[in-house]
Image (spheres, rainbow, N blue to C red):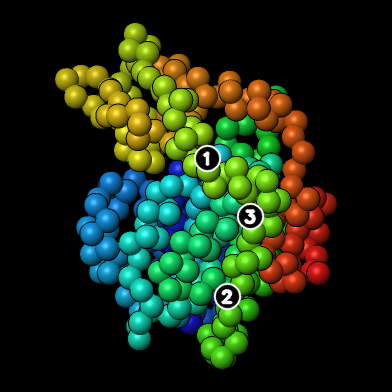
Amino acid sequence: MKAAIIVFSPSGHTLAAARMIQRSIEEKGGTADIINITKDDNLLFASKSERQKILEERLQEFDALFAGAPVYAGHAETHVLRILEALPEPDQKRSKIAVPFITYGGAHSFIALEEMGRALKKKKYVPVLGIKLASFHTLSRFFRTKILEHKPGDAEERLIEKVISTIFDLCLHTEHIQDNSSSFAYTKVPMRLMLNILSQEKIHAKFKTVSIIQENCRACKKCISVCPVNNFIFADGKVSIKDQKNCILCGECFYHCKSNAIDFAYRTVAQKRLNDGNIILEKDLSAVYPKRYGYINNEGELCYE
C-alpha cells in the first residue's frame, strides 16, 4: 500500500500523529509520503487554482489518502480545509479511500472530524474511517495544570495500528469500501448547529491582537522560525508582524520568546476558559469512527464497541 498524508501542525502534535501513521504503514511493508503544509506559503496563501496545480504535482499515485488537522475553536483548522478544497479528485492513480484525522487538547473536538469528512466527500473521496487523537493542549504550557502533556502517546499509536490494518485490508478488498462519515457527527446537535454558524474565524477574530513589544525584542528571530503561517518578518533591524488577520492564535511565538516581547492576550482568555488546566476531558479521549474499530477511555485502555 502507498499512502499520502497531508498535515498542518502548528505545534508539532498533528505531525507527530502523521509520523505514527507513516511508521505503522511502513512497518506493514507499505510506503507513505507526508505533505506538511506548515510554513508552506505556496500552499497556505496561494489562490485556489494555484493550490490545485501544486497538489496535482505533489499528489501522485496513492492507495489511501490521510488528511490531518488540529482542532481550533471546535473546528478543523481553516488552512487544512482550504487545502482539501483544492485536492485533485480520485482517478486511476489516486484511490478514493480517505481517512481524516484530528488532534485536539482533550476538551472539545466538536465538529472538526465531521468537517474534514465533509470536505473530502465534496472532492469525491470516501471517508472510510475517521480518527480523533488526544494531544497536548499547547495553550496550557503556562497553566497551573498542563493538559495531556504527553499525548499523543503509546495508546494513540496502538489505535493507529488498528486503523492501518483495516486500511490495508480495504485496499485489497475494495468492494468493502463504504462512506462512514456519518459516524463523525458525534457531537450533540445544538453544538453542531451553533458551530456551523460560528466559524473558526468568527470565534477567533476579535482575539487576533498579537503584537511585538519592541523595547523587549532582541531580534533573535525565534518567532519567525516557529510561526506556522510565516506571519513575522525581519527588516531594517527589527521584527514586525505582516498581518494580524493571518494569526491563528497558536501561541507559538509567545511560548518560544525568551525576551517577553510578544503580547499574546488570548493566552489569558484561554486560561480562564480552560479553568487553568483543570478541565473535564471528553469521555472517549481518542477514538476511531465508527467506534467499533476502537477507542481509548480516560484510563488509557483500548476498547471496542
- Front residue of 278/86: it is 86
Residue type of the residue flagged with mark 3: Leu
Residue located 37% across and 13% down the image: 213
| Residue picked out by circle 1 | 198
Q: Is residue 231 left or right of residue 251?
A: left
Asked if marks 1 and 3 touch (Cβ < 8 Å), the reply is: no
Label 3's element? strand
Residue type of the residue flagged with mark 1: Leu
Task: State the image quarter where residue 34 is shown.
Answer: bottom left
Residue type of the residue flagged with mark 2: Asp
Residue 287, disc: none
Residue lying farthest top?
A: 215
Task: State the image quarter where residue 174 is shown.
Answer: bottom right
- Front residue of 31/130: it is 130
| Residue picked out by circle 2 | 179
At label 3, counting other C-alpha atoms closer than 10 Å, the crowd grade (few under 14, some 14-19, many 20 or more) is many
Q: Quadrant of the C terminus?
A: bottom right
Q: CA distance from mark 1 to mark 2?
A: 27 Å
Q: Is residue 54 visible to the viewer in this orientation of the structure?
A: no
Label 2's element? loop
Residue located 49% across and 42% down the image: 199
Label 1's element? loop
| Residue picked out by circle 3 | 133
Q: CA distance from mark 2 to mark 3?
A: 20 Å
